Amino acid sequence: MRVLGVDPGLTRCGLGVVEGVPGRATLVAVGVVRTPADAPLGERLVALEREFESWLDLHRPDAVAVERVFAQSNVRTVMGTAQAGAVAVVCAARRGLPVALHTPSEVKASVTGSGRADKEQVGLMVARLLRLDGPPRPADAADALALARWVADSAEHLGGLDIVVSNVSALAIPDSEENWQASFEIDLMGAVRLVTAAMPHLLNSDAAVILAISSVSGREIDFAVGPYGTMKAALVHYIQGLAHQLAGQGIRANTVSPGNTFFEGGVWDQIREGNPELYAAALALNPTGRMGTPKEMARAVVFLASPLSSFTSGTNLVVDGALTRGVQF
């Protein structure tokens, strides 16, 4: 697979093309497109479009990856970046190429293992992964290459995408501002970003499914009330909205809300060791006399992802052994 990565910007726009399979990607081309800061906006956007089209004609990528604006205090800068990125998306869409959008922190984390890595660290890792003599210059090009390589590796390794499962949580239960922020960024926005990145591939699938793992704590008030429970409830709302929005395109979307799930080394195993009173109280709440197992939760996910539930979309499947007392209409 060949991917064109774009690190958008009006003044400097990084472009990079990589090709290969997971673990063996190679650099095809890298460069930076510049437009004069004093030129009219329309002329600058047209100049970017011409360069994008030229790169698409020359390198013929299978997909395009564009770095997405996530947070920026300078409104003028963020507007220019968004406009440049939009031009790249339009050029790719015009040719029917799948487009993936990823935030800078997602790209940094995939390449270096840390979403807070600086440009020097990203450049060094890109050089190592692509077996270059040194980091690509300028840094804009390194960012574009990192994004392109991540998407190329994922798509090539999986052979496309039919099923996307968002199963991530900060497990931030205590009520603090830090935990609210962490829960929002990881539990909720993690799912939103995953769906956004996967959408071009899901649209090419004839059996596309989106699944997110919520929790019974998002369904009723329990000891995890606060950031954890609130974001899990928001996740159900988000996924059900997707179910209605995407039904006409053949994409199903559902959530699974597990009850307390025990496995060695897991949260409840740690609670059993560190807080046996809480563990005993939680265990006593379930009329089955036990907690669930990872396999029981996974089977529910597999069912919803399979053709056996081809007419199921917009549901929240509770898998808790009758732990919760609420009636789900």
Image (tube, grey):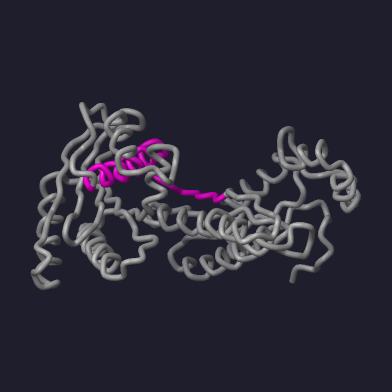
* Quarter of the view holding residue 127: top left
Location of the N terminus (image quadrant):
top left
Q: Front-most of 329 and 141?
A: 141
Q: Front-most of 205 and 31?
A: 31
| Residue 198 painted magenta | no
Location of the C terminus (image quadrant):
bottom right
Could one spot residue 32 in this view of the protein? yes
Q: Residue at x 36, y 66 (%)?
A: 73
Could one spot residue 312 in this view of the protein? no
Q: Front-most of 272 and 4?
A: 272
Q: Residue at x 25, y 52 (%)?
A: 7
Q: Tell me residue 77's x, y (percent).
A: 26, 65
Q: Tell me residue 75's x, y (percent).
A: 31, 70
Q: Is residue 67 above or below residue 238?
A: above
SS assignment for the magenta stretch, majority = helix
Q: Report how many numbered discs are placed on residues in the image.
A: 0
Is 276 displayed left or right of 247 in the figure?
A: right
Is 78 displayed left or right of 134 in the figure?
A: right
Is 257 displayed left or right of 94 in the figure?
A: right
Q: Front-most of 28 and 199?
A: 28
Is 273 displayed left or right of 143 in the figure?
A: right
Q: Tell me residue 101's x, y (percent).
A: 35, 55
Q: Tell me residue 263's x, y (percent).
A: 74, 36
Which portion, as a residue range, is magenta? 140-166
Q: Residue at x 43, y 46 (%)?
A: 115
Q: Residue at x 41, y 48 (%)?
A: 106
| Residue 147 painted magenta | yes
